[in-house]
Amino acid sequence: ARVSRGRGLVLLPWFKAGWTRLVSLPPPQEVPCHLPSPLLRPMRALWSRRGPRRPLSLLVLLRICHQSTGWQPPSRASSSGFRATSARWASAGAPGEAFEASVHRLVKAGDLEGLVGLSAESAGDLPALEWARILEGATGGFAARREASSALNAVLGGLVLQAGHDGAVAQAVALLEWMEDDGTPIAPDVVSYSCVASAAYRSGDAALGDLVTRRAAERADTVPRKERVRSRRPPAHASLDVAFEDGHLLAINKDSGVETHRNKGTPVKAPIVSELASAHCQGKLSSLGSAPGVVHRLDKGTSGLLVLAKTNRAHADLVAGFYLRRHRKAYKALVHGIPTTDTAAAETGGPMEVSLALDGLPAKSVVRVDETFPSAGCSLVTVRTLTGRKHQVRRHLASLGCPLVFEPIYDKTPKRRAARPVPRALQALAPRDKTSFFFLHSAQLYLDLDQHLMEPGSGGSSSNSGGHDFLELEAPLPDSWEKALAELR
């Protein structure tokens, strides 16, 4: 059906499933929250449509609902879209005040993991627009757009976890459609589309997943021309160190000093990972992100594992997996001093958990000391990230008083730098460009993938369990690191 100015995602299979639930429900009163999720947005669009012209499909849906339940949409004067009074929502079987209070508390605390869990628990039971109403109240009418966008993505993420539950995918699509509406202040981003597409793929509805990824690709093409950064042909001498490759994924071992994607200030002849990967794959990379194939990024000075997507399906699954913490990453870092937050853990060499909010969002890392160099005042550590904030590893290590060696941003105090001179064995590695090298290496990458994304015999350390494929990748330390550590020893 062509609904909502041709941008809707209502599909025939959902309509059939919605019809079965529709005829078995008691007649609604004043709001259409009794209707199944796939019909909510078309009904809302019907009475809020401006002008005399309305799509024929909406009129057909209205006729079916009227014959089946006796329900008629309220007039424009008596309705404010999906918003309604608490009494109306109560009569429609909305959740109690305790549930709404829990959502408000989680949103205020920025506990997205808790919100994901709450969404997963209520999958299939709470209408999508009811979620929108609750989050609207929790974010002050969507005034805090960043918090509102994060909360909506968390709800979508919870529905992904329950993709096999009846109605969870339909609810996710209905919420995505609401976000796509021109009158909605919160527009969907690549995480929103990826969560819904991943839920569709993992529930076995590949056609729906393809449709959602196409919508995401269309949105990516609408970036204003002034904001686009033109890709260039990579230098002839540049090459990729491929750690894993199949028909869906490309994992590389990135060198320090190489940017993940081109920015406005990037030199013309500088090697760029996304451009090198595009040349390697002959342009066959995903089109959902800001740069072809780029799912996540590493800082210019960071070396190690970086995964790119060849197909939009793989891109959506990877983005949803990173957002829901299904994928795990571990870094090696050479730092000043010995990180410690717990004396007992430091004495036994056990891991230490660092919980420090970054940019107003919760952030957690686990730090383990692998080796110490007392004469140089340095230590080699492994950092496992439990969240994915910007510069999380660097900022958490700096908060412990143990910044990276050659840290360019989070170790600016002159007195602190004077008290921590760079060891003589490392001075030869000091970069001219402070952002092009520091001792941080992405050493391990553990991916929980959709079972249809792994090709047999494609390499890597992989296993299969319960419809999931697990791919584990490792990247050895660079030669410059090995030489420096040998001298420190």
Image: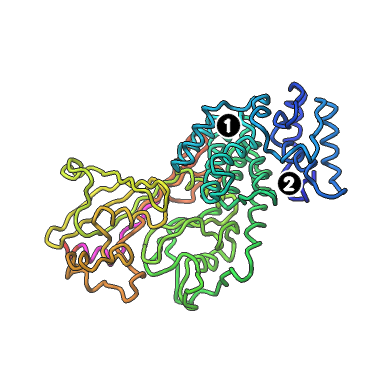
Residue 358 placement, left or right of 382:
right
Q: Residue at x 59, y 44 (%)?
A: 141
Q: Secondary structure at mark 1?
A: loop
Q: Which residues are magenta?
A: 471-485
Q: In the rendered image of this protein, does residue 404 appear above or below residue 178?
A: below
Instruction: Please say if the residues under marks 1 and 2 sit with CB atoms less than 8 Å apart.
Output: no
Q: Residue at x 49, y 51 (%)?
A: 458
Q: Which is nearer the N-term, disc 1 or disc 2?
A: 2
Q: Nearer the viewer, residue 452 or 439?
A: 439
Image disc number at residue 473: none
Q: Would residue 473 be counted in the magenta stretch?
A: yes
Q: Position of residue 13 (x, y in %)?
A: 74, 36
The 10 Å Cα crowd at callout 2, few under 14, some 14 to 19, many 20 or more, is many
Q: Residue at x 53, y 29 (%)?
A: 99
Q: Is residue 454 in sight in this rendering?
A: no
Name the residue that disc number 1 marks: 123
Q: Position of residue 149 (x, y in %)?
A: 55, 48
Q: In the rendered image of this protein, does residue 336 appear above or below residue 130?
A: below
Question: Which quadrant of the figure has residue 237?
Answer: bottom left
Residue 376 placement, left or right of 163:
left
Name the residue that disc number 2 marks: 8
